[in-house]
Image: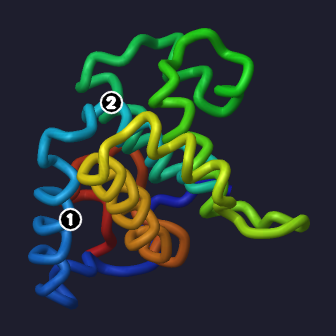
Amino acid sequence: MTTTESRLPNPAVLVPELKDIGGVLYRATGNGTIPQTTISLVQLRAGQIVGSTYLTVLHTGNLRKAGATEESITAVASWRDAPYFTAAERIALELVESVLTPNTSGERVPDELYARASAQYDDKALATLIMAIGQVCFFLPLALIGKPLPGVSPAEQWRP
């Protein structure tokens, strides 16, 4: 079944503070400590994990704009055995998977994973990466419940 309109009208019109929140999150993750490609890789992976076409289309486009290769974009879902990612990108992808995927044998983010992340990122960069995961998680309910239309301008993605 194809959807021709979102479930909700534009939430930024319904709750104008959303624009402020989004702007602050964007500035926080854009502080230069993490490459934009890494942020978009993490956010694309989050969209894949939760099954959001809107988020996967959005963050695939963001990766293209940031200069990521088609091979790396295509391989995000199978990043563990793909040769396209740096050690830092791999840790970032592992972190977002750990946050969004239940771990039946213990903590979602064990000390060992945190230690490996700390080896790749200084404290500010790691905090920024955590905020990038939080940023996409903040918008997950809007993407999954509101179902904005993927691949169209922000003005067209929400029903009137």
Between residue 63 and residue 119, name the one nearer to us. 119
- The residue beneath circle 2 is 37
Where's the C terminus, which quadrant? bottom left
Tell me the distance, in whole angstroms, between the alpha carbons under discs 1 and 2.
Answer: 16 Å
- Does residue 101 show up? yes
**Number of disc labels:** 2
Q: Position of residue 148 (x, y in %)?
A: 40, 64
Q: Position of residue 73 (x, y in %)?
A: 50, 23
Between residue 51 and residue 91, name the one nearer to us. 91
| The residue positioned farthest toward the bottom in the image shown | 15
Give the SS element for disc 2. helix
Q: Quadrant of residue 93?
A: top right
Q: Is residue 31 left or right of residue 101?
A: left
Give the SS element for disc 1. helix
> Badge 1: how crowded within 10 Å, few (<14), some, or many (20+)?
some
- The residue beneath circle 1 is 25
| The residue positioned farthest toward the right in the image shown | 105
Please, what is the three-letter code of the amino acid marked with disc 1?
Leu
- Against 77, is 73 above or below? above
Where's the N terminus, which quadrant? bottom right
Q: Residue at x 60, y 62 (%)?
A: 99
Q: Quadrant of residue 106?
A: bottom right
Please, what is the three-letter code of the amino acid marked with disc 2?
Thr
- Does residue 50 show up? no
